[in-house]
Image (cartoon, rainbow, N blue to C red):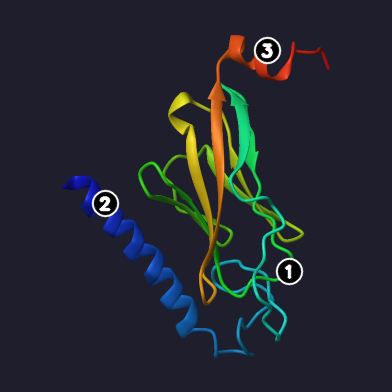
Amino acid sequence: MFLATRRTLHLHLLLFVVLISCSTSDQEGGRWGNPNNQLGVPREPEKLSEERFVTQNNSEVVGQVGSSVILHCKTSSATGGLVSWIRKRDYQLLTVGLHTHSSDDRFTINYVHWDWQLHIRYVQPRDAGAYECQVSSHPPTSLFVHLQVVGQRLRRRFLGPLKNM
């Protein structure tokens, strides 16, 4: 019961953010207004293109306990909507645009050349699982990245011995 209520709350929060961005879109100079709108999303071109991801869907990232990982969500061009990261295990809304909504400060968002990068510092076993990169365009599109978390011994088996840098 509590989990269903929590999921609903997260989805309502995402919908609220999208509605707020749409209601302010025609003010101060066009669809997004200033070069960066209130959500920190870079200004998009006037012509909206169909959203396509460059990052492969259902890709897998392996991270070692205590290390940092980056989950990539690269689009082929300007998005027609907001980009959000959602942790599927508990439907936790992590980021919307360039803003982090998680109370866990290990999660941060970075945007580089159409690549919406979810950074996770000090990876823990509980971080393992699916993460959804969602573009709130019409129709909405999603890409999934699966994080596998390994300990020191398993890391050596998957990635080879650690090298001194």
**At which x and y percent is residue 111?**
68, 56
Between 112 and 137, the one lying in front of the other is 137
Q: Earlier in the sequence, mark 1 or mark 3?
A: 1
Taking the spot 49% from the left edge, 26% from the top edge, the residue there is 124
Vertical arrangement, residue 3 with respect to residue 54, above or below: above
Q: Are marks 3 and 2 in contact (CB under 8 Å)?
A: no
| Local secondary structure at mark 2 | helix
Q: Which residue is mark 1?
A: 77
Taking the spot 83% from the left edge, 17% from the top edge, the residue there is 165
- In three-dimensional space, the C-alpha distance between marks 1 and 2, rounded to whole angstroms, equals 33 Å
| Local secondary structure at mark 3 | helix
The quarter of the picture where residue 163 lies is: top right
- In three-dimensional space, the C-alpha distance between marks 1 and 3, rounded to whole angstroms, equals 37 Å
Q: Which residue is mark 2?
A: 6
Q: Are marks 1 and 2 in contact (CB under 8 Å)?
A: no
Question: Label 2 is placed on what type of residue?
Answer: Arg
Q: Are marks 1 and 3 in contact (CB under 8 Å)?
A: no
- In three-dimensional space, the C-alpha distance between marks 3 and 2, rounded to whole angstroms, equals 38 Å
**At which x and y percent is residue 158?**
67, 19
The residue carrying pointer 2 sits among few (fewer than 14), some (14 to 19) or many (20 or more) residues within 10 Å by Cα, namely some
Q: Tally the marks.
A: 3
Vertical arrangement, residue 5 with respect to residue 151, above or below: below
Between 142 and 24, the one lying in front of the other is 142
Vertical arrangement, residue 12 with respect to residue 101, above or below: below
Question: Label 3 is placed on what type of residue?
Answer: Arg
Q: Which residue is mark 3?
A: 156
Q: Earlier in the sequence, mark 3 or mark 2?
A: 2
Question: Label 1 is placed on what type of residue?
Answer: Ser
Left or right: 44 with respect to 140?
Answer: right
